[in-house]
Amino acid sequence: MDAVPLIVLGLVIYSVVWIVSFYVRDRRKRAVQAIAETLGFQFLGNGIQHIPLQARELPLFNKGRARRAENVIRGKRSDVDVLIFDYCYRIGRGNNSSTHYQTVITLTSDRLALPRFWLGPENLFHKIGQFFGLHDINFSDYPDFSKRYLLKGEDEAGIRRAFHHSVLLWFEARKSVNTEGVGRSIIYYHLGRNRAPDFWRSHLEEALSLYRQFVK
């Protein structure tokens, strides 16, 4: 009999958590729908299938498990097809598991022809990793870029061509951004950071600014 109150309490707590979670997700969905309308974009809902096939090859979309793309909106800016969405994945198991969220922008254009690359903020673990063979593509004429970012990919010569003067200066002027590219697609995000829908417009403008550097 003593177990009954505990079971009831557990059900009550579960119900409250579910209701709060539903409310938060629904409120964000409505905010994204409103932003989509102001941008002239279409709200597509949820689903990995909305991400371009080539972009799905990139490292972010192959991390962890329980991967989800939510609140996907789609539009066009000049010659660029744009997707903005919330993306999450889970790593670890049991009590050691954690879920990582970020707002991602995907830009796709026929003007892009990029080698596969990954770029993100360089941290202490990366610096230690370089002693054990982790390869970081550095640019001796751009020490701030090389100090601030880890850049990697198999086609080093192609990556060096893609990361010309304008691109390197663009990254030197910013901190803590992540970018991945392959072929006709770039993705742009801040790892582990879901942007509030009110900031999606400025987030998009920043991503388009980077795109313009790559196609110069």
Image (spheres, rainbow, N blue to C red):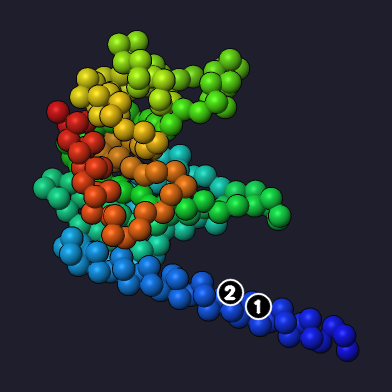
Residue farthest along the top direction in this orientation? 140
Where is residue 92 shown, x and y percent of the image?
65, 48
Q: Secondary structure at mark 1?
A: helix
Q: Amino acid at mark 2?
A: Val
**Taking 197 as reference, is 189 above or below it?**
above
Callout 1 touching callout 2 (CB < 8 Å): yes
- Residue 44 vs residue 102: left or right? left
Mark 1 vs mark 2, CA separation in Å: 6 Å
Where is residue 109 shown, x and y percent of the image?
20, 42
Residue visible at 21% across and 42% down? 208
Where is residue 95 shown, x and y percent of the image?
71, 55
> Of residues 24 and 56, which is closer to you in this image?
24
Q: Quadrant of residue 148?
A: top left
Q: Quadrant of residue 187?
A: top left
Image quarter in which the C terminus is found: top left
- Residue 2 vs residue 46: left or right? right
Residue 157, visible in the rendered structure:
no
Q: Quadrant of residue 59?
A: top left
State the mark number for residue 160: none
Residue tagged 1: 13
Image quarter in which the N terminus is found: bottom right
Q: Secondary structure at mark 2?
A: helix
Badge 1 crowding class, 10 Å Cα cut-off, few under 14, some 14 to 19, many 20 or more, is few
State the mark number for residue 17: 2
